[in-house]
Structure formats: C-alpha cells, structure tokens
Amino acid sequence: MPKMEKGLIELYHEDPERADYLVFGRRAGPDRRGFLRGAGLASMGALLGTAIPFSANMPLGLIPAALADSVDEFRFEAKHGDLIIHNDRPVNMETPAHLLDDDITPAANHFIRNNGTMPMPMSKADWRLKIDGEVETELELSYDQLMNEFELVTLRLQIECGGNGRAGFNPLPRGNPWTIGAIGNAEWTGVRLRDILRRAGVKQSAVYTGHFSYDDHLSGDPDRQAISRGGPIDKMMDPHTIVALQMNGGDIPIEHGYPARIVAPGWAGSVSQKWVTRIWVRDREHDGSGMTGLSYRMPRYPVEPGAEVPHEDMMVMGSMIVKSVITNPVAGTDVQAGRPFELRGQAWAGDDWVTAMEVSIDFGATWQAASVDPAPNRYSWQRWRAQVTPPQAGYYEVWARATDNRGRSQPMVVPGWNPRGYLNNACHRIHVNAV
Amino acid sequence: MKKSFLPGAARVAPILGLVLGLGLAAPALAGDDYEFAPLPPGEGAEETYFACIACHSLRTVTNGGYSRAVWDELLDWMVEEQGMMELDPEEREIILDYLATHLGEDWSG
C-alpha cells in the first residue's frame, strides 16, 4: 500500500475511483461496481485482516467501514489541522476560538456539521434545484440558470449550529459536544431565495419550506433523509436568505454543500441545507427529519436540568441568540503584567445585531467597554476589540459579554437547560498568564 | 437525485465491521490496543460495538455519557426514526446495561 499523503477520506472525496486505485489498486468493473483483482484485493484484505467475501458487490469508491471508523486515523486535509474532530462518521468538526479571528472565515476553518454520509460530489451539470408545493409553477433550475438568470448577491453570513455550546450543559444532552466553535462567517455568493420563490409564484397557502438534499442517511436507506428541515416563509423571503453557489469566491467545498446550499443566516445551521436539491413549499410547518420530537426544539417554558419534557411542549427554534467569542489572544498565552494587550473577537446575535461589548479580567467584578464594528451587511458577525492591562503578574480570566440591539446580554452562567442542549450563549472566557 | 451506488453502503458496512471483529482486529489501524476501542472495556462492549458501527463511528457513542433513561430513549429513537435494525430484547438489555454502566453521566471521554 502506498504511503498516503492525504487523509483517506479526502482522497475518496476528491476522486473515489482514483482513490480506489491508489490505495488498493482497485479498478471499476463495467457495471460501475468495483471488482478487486490481484494485488488490490490482497491489499484491501490484508488491511482489514481478512478476505472480503462480497468484494464483487462492494461499491466503487466506498471506504471500508473498518478503515473509516478510527477517528485517530481521520484527517481532513482541506481543513486546518487544529480543528476539533467530534466525529468522523458522520463528520463533525469544530473550530477552536483562535481560528475564528478572520472577519471572513476561510473554508479551511469553517466548522462542519453533517447528519448523514459525506456525499460524493454531484457535478454542476447534473445538479438541479426543484421548487414545488404551494407554488403556481414548479421549477427545476440548473446551476447555470441560477448563475445567469438571477441577480447574484455576495454577503458575509453567520451560520451557527443550534447546539453550539452544548458541552456546557449539565446533564450533558446527547449530540455533538460543541464548545464555542460551531460558528462560521464566510462570504457567500448566491441567489436570494425569495427571487426564486417569486419566479415560481408563492401561493397564499405557503407557510413553510421543507429542504431536501442528495446526501445519504447514515443507515444507507435511500428512503430516509439525513436531515430535512426548513423555515417559516417570512425567514425564507428575507433578502439575506440565499441559495449559495459560491463560498469565499470559489466553488463551495463538498463538506459545505457543493455545488449549492441554502444559507439562512442567524438560524440553526440545519435550516441552511447543504447539497440542496429540492425546496418544498408547504402549507404547514415542515415535518421532515430533524423537525419533530425534541430535535431543534426548545421547551415552551423553563425546565429543570435533566427534565423529561413532553414532545407537545416543545417548539421549533427560531433565531439564534446574542453571543461572542474571544479570538485573540489564544487561551493560555503569556502577556506582560502592567502593559496593555489587545483582546479581540467576533460577536453576533442571530437575526439581530450587537450594539455593545464588554470585557472583564476580574471575574466579572468590573467591566470595561470594548469597541464593536458595525456589520458590513446584516447577518454578518461583528469585530470587537479592547485594550486591557493586567495590573500585576498572575493568572487572569478574560470574560467577554455582548449585548444585542434589544438590550439582551449574554449570561455569565449557562442559561436554561433543555433536552437537546441548544442555545447556550454563556460568556466565552479564556485564561492568560501575566508575567 | 441519489447517487446510485451509495445505498449499497448500508449493506456492506456491517459485513466489514463483522469480519474485522472476528478477524485479527487490525492492530495497525486502531488507535488503542483494545479491540473495541474507543469503547471502554466492559461486559457488553462487543455487542455494543457491532450494534453501533453498522451506521456510525464509535465516537458518536463515546462523545457523551448519559443516564440509562437517555440511552434507552436513544436506542428507541434510532430504531423508530433512524432505520436501525431492531435489537433482540436480550441483546438490547446487554447493550443498555453496558452503556448505562460504562458510559453513564460521569463518563468524561
């Protein structure tokens, strides 16, 4: 087996047939299934520790589950090496706070939250977006049509996982234990969803969308959606909700939804369907995978930590809430006692925006105002900065607190527990050593 | 607009998981010597390993420790809503015992 310079998963994503050949010497049969011959079969078998009885049936480009399973072996070369891997099947990667320092999040630093299998990329030529349901005219649009027949907009838009901060809840709700970095603010280019919906002609009966994509459910069952969420028609008609065709000026990387995805900024990231192929306009709240039960829902009333909440008392989450992150300095950095150093970071507030930012280095006893830049466009996160001076040598915690345009601030402690661990917007804090 | 070759993954993945476990467990690939890593050793680890790995990595399991009630609900949810094959009751009990005991609320990864 040749030495792999790229991670197995990435190699397979780039070109599964070639990856099969490189890694295992495996070539496609005429029916597009793989067949293993000679050295290829032997090397795959040797790696697995046994023969593969059904090798003739094994789909081409499929990473053997046994190899794909070890997260220790998992690397994603397109991503910054410091990203935190929560899972590799499905792929879930979080950005450490200091890598959120860019005003425009590079693709390499953007978190990944997948619910299903990372799909093999569908070509732009094959891809279509279908609009159906409560519309006058069903549409089926190609990538080129979207690019050429509609006005394109380019916006910096925050996408945050609804469960960002989940790790702070006690008892820990199930799901990825995100800390603070399931947030990104890339520059997305695409078509306003409302322009597409208007071309289709939205009926009076339209109240909600349901989104579908070409990735597969983890079980492999083709009749199941890995995730199929949506949003109320008002949110979908917001001029900042787009069908994105580009990320940071280039093709959207496969892990972020190639060739096209929805970006519905300010709401749980799952509304921003990756690999989108269909938008079903509905006359009621969508009931696809991830819309019902406890998923992406909050209790209608405050509950005790660990409480069992009846499903009928849960309601679908709307906008995310005010939050901020300290991106500089890196936690644990040495700073000079008696000398000012720059604290900075990003702040955002779902559908709203941030109007004030404060920092504290004395465990919240006193607070100092930080500057907050206006957003370059609505729904972008905002840069904040402050100069702080540790009065003497020792251990300090830096706390940061954002306030939104409606006067709502981040709590110092973890806010209301809920069954699936959403909307933890407690203040981010880091430590520094003054020397 | 599904890719035609992907549904086959469901059928193939469990087979590979099985042959790996019964074979020599590919020590070069595991990050740990324990054959059911990253699961912590304990009675029922083997049953748990094979029940889970058909669909998702074991990291999904070891990412958090939960109470028996949460694990119980999670097993139901995977069967009822996520296409997991129903476990036979005896096996389900072994797995639930294992999860509640070894990956309970005090589990810290």
Image (cartoon, coloured by chain):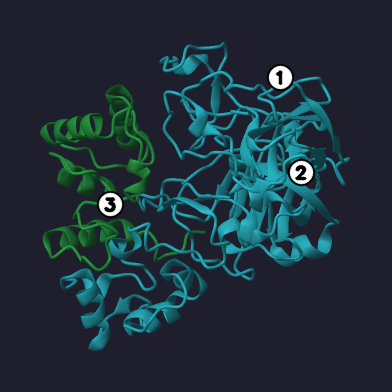
Chain colours: A cyan, B green
> Visible in this render: residue B21?
yes
Relative height, residue A10 to residue A324 (above, below): below
Q: Residue A347 appears at what percent x and percent y? A: 75, 38
Q: CA distance from mark 2 to mark 1?
A: 20 Å
Q: Nearer the viewer, mark 1 or mark 3?
A: 1
Return the residue nearer the eye: A90 or B34.
Answer: B34
Q: Quadrant of the N terminus of chain A?
A: bottom left
Sequence-wise first label, 2 or 1: 2
Find out whether the residues at labels 2 and 1 contact each other: C-beta distance under 8 Å: no
Mark 3 neighbour density, 10 Å: few (under 14) some (14–19) many (20 or more): many
> What residue does disc 1 label?
A365
Dot label at residue B54: 3
> What residue does disc 2 label?
A344
Decide if residue B15 is on the left or right side of residue A382: left
Q: Toward which corner of the image does residue A384 lie, by quadrant?
A: top right
Find out whether the residues at labels 3 and 2 contact each other: C-beta distance under 8 Å: no
Q: Toward which corner of the image does residue A435 lie, by quadrant?
A: top right
Mark 2 neighbour density, 10 Å: few (under 14) some (14–19) many (20 or more): many
> Visible in this render: residue A291?
no
Which amino acid, by three-letter code, is at mark 1? Answer: Ala
Return the residue nearer the eye: A155 or A97.
Answer: A97
Q: Nearer the viewer, mark 2 or mark 1?
A: 1
